Image: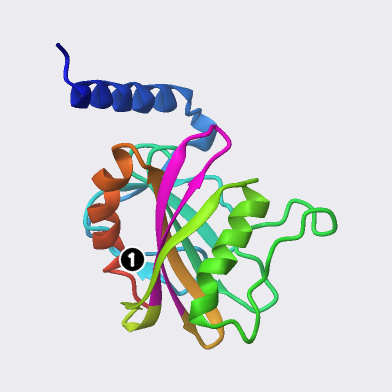
Amino acid sequence: MIRKTTWISVAAKVLALSVLLMTSPASANGYREQGKTVKVAKSDLHVTPPQDWNKLSIRPGKNAETWTLDGEQLNDVTFYGGIAPGKPLVKERNKKREPLPKMKEDTLLIDIPELLEGTYRAYKQIGIFKLTSTEPSKFLGLDSVKFTYEYVDADNLTRLGEGHAAIVEGELYMATFDAPRLHYFAQGLDAFHALVGTASLP
């Protein structure tokens, strides 16, 4: 009899292969080499990846960019750099018909998870989204908020996520990690933590 865990492993590998085969050169990546410090999200945010990563060429917003290890659908690290008051986390498709929640001058750390939730619901058309934890933490060497969440995407795949956010001189700096609940979230979480641990501002 084939064990259940074997079926899970096979399913995960098939999912990985299918996603990678569907990835076109147009959405191919910029290489982010281990040990080389780079600026991210067109901001003063710097990271020094402890391992090689790929940066997707398609940016979700002016001050946002996405990195991945195995493909955007399998593990997705998004950096948000210096989101100013009055600005959304990602680019609005239609400001009048599909407005996104904005960073505000009076936004507090405790408000950031709700800001991300609202953005996901509107931008990614997510109906099922649940914050699972929120706690004080350290990010960029500053007081920050760490939060976790889960949601069901457009393909009815349950994804888990974790975010780290700090507000610096009224602007938001944040890194999030999203991956399918099955296999990939647990597999990539340590790599995300190692990457986020190198984040700094001059």
Query: Which residue reaches farthest right?
Result: 96
**Is 51 drawn above or below residue 152 in the view shown?**
below
Query: Is residue 36 visible from the viewing direction of this image?
Result: no
**Mark 1 element type:** strand
Q: Position of residue 55 (x, y in %)?
A: 42, 48
Considering depth in this image, is 147 or 81 the residue closer to the camera? 147
Residue appearing at x 26%, y 47% in the figure = 186
Look at the picture and state if 188 lies above or below 141: above
Mark 1 belongs to which amino acid? Val
Q: Quadrant of the C terminus?
A: bottom left
- The image shows residue 28, relative to residue 123, as above or below, that is above
Above or below, 1 against 132 in this view is above
Q: Residue at x 78, y 54 (%)?
A: 98
Residue under label 1: 47
- Residue lying furthest front: 1
The stretch of residues the image draws in magenta is 145-166
Dominant secondary-structure state across the stretch colored magenta: strand
